[in-house]
Amino acid sequence: MTTIAVPHPASNATRTGQATQIEQSRAGAEVYAAVLVAQQCPRNVDAARTEMLEACRMTALAERASFRFSRGGTQVSGPSVHLARELARCWGNIQYGVAELRRDDANHQSELQAFAWDVQTNARAAAIFIVPHKRDKKDGPVAITDMRDIYESNANAGARRVRECILNVLPVWFVEEAKETCRQTLTDGGGEPLVKRVATAVERFGTMGITENQLAGKMGKARREWTPEDLATLTVIYRSIQRGEMAKDEEFPSTTPTVTAADITGPRATEVKEEPDKAPKADSKPAILDQINRWFDERKLTDDQVTYVAALAQRRTLGAMKDLTADEASAVLDQLPGIAAQDDPVTALQEIAAEWHDRPAGEAKP
């Protein structure tokens, strides 16, 4: 009997496909071509700076140019990956990216490499790092197994490393001028009136459940005192919360009990039952003003709040809520339950304000 030995086929794990071989050859040729083009067509620094300034004067980029998050009880901020990528485009002759080198499902982690390479000056920054397949929670890290969750986790970690690599190969002056230009763009607001921008900011945060009182506490001043620089800071905070870099409770921690409309307009279970039409009042003027502010916030009436309060306090001119005396603030708070009981509280307030608008301060109500 004749035995024929058949060679064992190569393992699929070590076999290199034709497409892979082509890609390896193409990658090598691409790198060579990039270096050659960079040497033959060097960047124009003045043109790159002009293009950078034009890009940073665009509100769409300026609002995404910074990140902000909490670490160890302090706020960390800096230029975002969006700004880094735009600067790399403007500077030119830069290659950057992130690649997954290995995925270890047994140990629940991925090994990635991020890099940025100035092919003209041959300045290069690279980082190889491990990304655990986990997500941080308040109770501790939780393993993730869904393929999409793992991909997004790797992409987020890779984007942060790519940002640092790009910033490391760009000139410091170029990055700093871009950051300052973006900040100035947010401060200018595209020529929009400051009052309108303030209203827009309050409305934006309102959609996140953040009140005007919380914003005022964050900035340390009332809404009418906000400056363009304050709005620029609020814009960075808003975008950071929107992108998930910062939780709203971290930026706006709740330090006082939430007061709802029911707390103001309804009687408490154990007190003042004989006077159910009156809202319970705090003892101090700041606490009373806080309840009034919350009442208006509940009904989104902050734009004309001072006008309405001035009418309720029977004062034709009122620069700010803090100008009220404690007795006047209490008088205003006493009127809110009756107004809230109206079919249309807004119309009721408008009628009161119109009635008192042209009357001298302190004139008795007819």
Image (cartoon, rainbow, N blue to C red):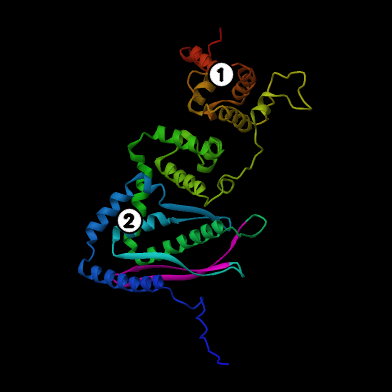
- Image x and y of residue 272, in percent: 76, 22
Q: Is residue 126 magenta?
A: yes
Of circles 2 and 1, the one toward us is: 2
> What range of the chain is rendered magenta?
109-136
Horizontal side, residue 363 vs residue 99: left or right: right
Mark number, residue 33: none
The C terminus - image quarter: top right
Separation of marks 2 and 1 at Cα, in angstroms: 50 Å
Query: What amino acid type should be assigned to the residue bearing mark 2?
Result: Glu
Horizontal side, residue 253 vs residue 164: left or right: right
Compare residues 4 and 330 and report the one nearer the observer. 4
Query: What amino acid type should be assigned to the residue bearing mark 1?
Result: Leu
Residue at position x 32%, y 61% from top? 173
Callout 2: SS: helix
Q: Residues within 10 Å of mark 2 (few under 14, many from 20)?
A: some
Give the residue at mark 2. Answer: 177
Give the residue at mark 1. Answer: 312
